[in-house]
Image (tube, rainbow, N blue to C red):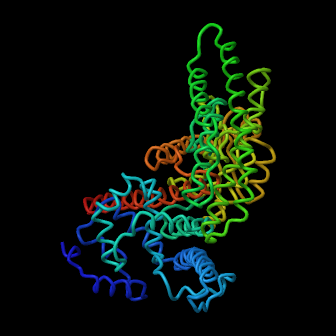
Amino acid sequence: MKLATLDRKNGTHMKNTLFSSENKDLGLFFTLDVDTELSKILRKAFELYRRYPRIERLITRDLDAYGIEKKKERLLDAAWVKQQTLSLGLNYSESPENPAKIDLALGRKRMEPLVAYILLLLEGDFQSLTDKQATERILDSKTLEFFFQFYGLGAIPARSTRHENVRKISQTTQDYILKQQLFMVRDDFLDNFEYLTVDSTAVKANSVWPTDSGLLNDILHRTYHLSQQLHERFGIPNFLQWYMPMWLKKMNQLNFQINVTSGKGARRKRKKLYDKLYTVAEKAIFHMKRELDKHRAQKDELNILPGKLSQLNILWDFIEDYVSDAEQVISYSKERILEEKVIKNEDKVISLSDGSAAFITKGDRETVVGYRPQLGRSQNGFVTALIVPEGNAADSPQLLPLVKRTIKNTGVIPSCVSADDGYSSNQGVRTVKAEGVNWVSINGAKGKKLTSDIDWISEELTEARRMRSAVESLMFVLKHVLGFGKLRRRNIESVRLEMLQKVIVHNFRQMIIVEERNEKRQRQERAKVFQAS
């Protein structure tokens, strides 16, 4: 294979001429015996990247902002060292207090925007850039090796570098990538976006199912673990152990007993066990609060590198938040377990690892701890809009936002919008039609009440109801091919970005499928014409 023997010089030359107006052959690399699914995705992704140069500018802006942030941290640390060791006589021409004056022209080499862009897609496709399986796929992929070599991008970045830079590509940039991706779909006649189906689904957060005893046990174990890192990481004394190891061991035992208690009299037995658990946990909380007060003065007077101080403040905030969470869990748990009161979900600590997660109930399906994303699907299977609301948001208020987001992303007002009866509301139908939509199809008995008899049996709405089930196939593909149903990231901002990455990769896959389907149809039509002649 010729490509495998290209040297860096030739690769760099290709990189310099790649974006010139004379270079029309986007598929040049992929004609050299490279015909894998990944190569097809890279080809479409690169075509989008070259067709819309603002993608490169936006990624460059994000990476520059990250570079300035990191360089500011280094300069602040260097200024602190200079202050401590005046005899060094160092000359600092850049001001660490004003990042706008920091020059990135000199210093550490930054990641190429094209590399960050490709890694962004790989994370959406492989579901990670850092776990063992994803790392092996990246390092073992000849397609990626050839791609990086051909475009003079050097070696594939190390795992930590991949992670740090890709996570700095902003929501604004990724929203723009999705929008231009859909513009390319429209301009290449892969879909006219005249038909829109909307639906929601439940996805699991990166968190275990919460129980009061499990949460309380986990919170105080984490608090204690963090409190024992202070000396090694920051040079101040760790929190006094006191009876904490013994209390935590006892809490482990009680949590286990609570979880395995069943049969006759189980409720009474669990109440007794919980009462013991609260007593032990309250002792641990009291001790941790006392240690926080005792160590706070030492923390505030600590003279260490600014970067280290920032890390200490983050760790300290975690400890304080965990202690507060433990008190909250005991408070509502006593009401729920001992007094048998019903506690609202919003008053509970749902997850320690992901504070944005909520109990998601959709229809008769199993309740999950996670999120309820809303999606728009075009007739040819492209995701036109993604909205991830907070909590277990009802579907009906999301109908108009989904339609508006679709119009913004595609530049097309759909002729028909189809949804299930969870989206039914008179106001929703009216506002969607006010956007210029001709037909709004709401399935089920609720939808029928909102629709006139003549419209209900019309050809347009009958066809819309028939085709609505196609959105279920989209959900299946997203969940079982791209891991959309089980999240890896935590907190809503990161969750939104993870889902968006997967949607972008799905759309590239769908572009390939639709193109190949169109090409097959054209070959069949040409064959019929040839046979007829």
What residue sits 60% from the left and 41% below the top?
465
**On the rendered structure, is 495 left or right of 293?**
left
**On the rendered structure, is 440 left or right of 523?**
right
What residue sits 48% from the left and 76% below the top?
113
Q: State the residue in front, 44 or 304.
A: 304
Q: Kindly indicate the quadrant of the structure image that contains residue 466.
A: top right
**On the rendered structure, is 450 left or right of 190?**
right
| Residue extending furthest toward the left | 1
What residue sits 30% from the left and 70% below the top?
30
| 258 over 268 or under it: above or below | below
| 86 over 60 or under it: above or below | below
**On the rendered structure, is 154 left or right of 225?**
left
| 246 over 88 or under it: above or below | above
On the image, the x and y values in percent for residue 511 come to: 44, 61
Q: State the residue in front, 428 or 189.
A: 428
Q: Kindly indicate the quadrant of the structure image that contains residue 216.
A: top right
On the image, the x and y values in percent for residue 107 come to: 49, 84
Q: State the residue in front, 173 or 436.
A: 173
On the image, the x and y values in percent for residue 43 come to: 38, 69
| 435 over 473 or under it: above or below | below
On the image, the x and y values in percent for residue 442 come to: 68, 41
| Residue extending furthest toward the top | 264
**Is residue 395 at all visible to an observer of this figure?**
no
**Is residue 168 at all visible to an observer of this figure?**
yes
The quadrant of the rendering that contains the N terminus is bottom left
Q: State the residue in front, 480 or 10.
A: 10
Q: How many marks?
A: 0
What residue sits 46% from the left and 59% below the top?
123
The quadrant of the rendering that contains the C terminus is bottom left
